[in-house]
């Protein structure tokens, strides 16, 4: 799927400062897409929804 066809939103944990440490996420029924908001045409990570849920649960512990 083309990145421009996805509905991207910024993580609520991304900084709002000028450094621009921002992560954007787009959900589809079968895949969670992750990209750097400073490089929207660059590489992105993809996860199955279950793997993403496991990661978020783990990250919330820290």
Image (tube, helix red, strand yellow):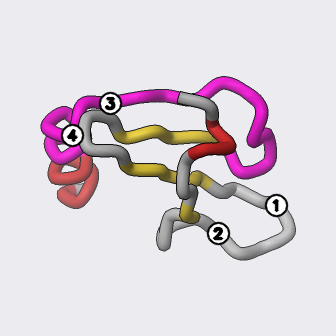
Please provide percent x and percent y for residue 31: 32, 35
Which residue in the protein does label 3 denote? 47
Which residue in the protein does label 1 denote? 19
Q: Are marks 1 and 3 in contact (CB under 8 Å)?
A: no
Q: Are marks 3 and 2 in contact (CB under 8 Å)?
A: no
Tell me, for residue 46, which label it has, or none: none
**Is residue 35 depicted above or below 62 in this figure?**
above
Q: Which stretch did the figure color magenta?
A: 36-55
Which residue in the protein does label 2 denote? 15
- The crowd level at tag 1 (other Cα within 10 Å; few <14, some 14-19, many 20+) is few
Q: Earlier in the sequence, mark 2 or mark 4?
A: 2
Give SS at disc 2.
loop
Give SS at disc 3.
strand
Q: Are marks 1 and 4 in contact (CB under 8 Å)?
A: no
C-alpha span from label 2 to label 4: 24 Å
**Mark closer to the observer (1, 4):** 4
Which residue in the protein does label 4 denote? 49
x 79%, y 48%: residue: 38
Q: Are marks 3 and 4 in contact (CB under 8 Å)?
A: yes
Quadrant of the image for the C terminus?
bottom left
Give SS at disc 1.
loop
**Mark closer to the observer (2, 4):** 4
Q: Are marks 2 and 1 in contact (CB under 8 Å)?
A: yes
């Amino acid at each position: 799927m083309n990145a421009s066809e996805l509905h991207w939103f910024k993580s609520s944990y991304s900084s709002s400062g000028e450094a621009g440490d921002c992560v954007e996420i787009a959900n589809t029924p079968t895949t969670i897409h992750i990209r750097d908001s400073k490089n929207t045409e660059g590489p992105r990570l993809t996860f199955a929804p279950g793997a993403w849920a496991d990661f978020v649960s783990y990250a919330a512990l820290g």
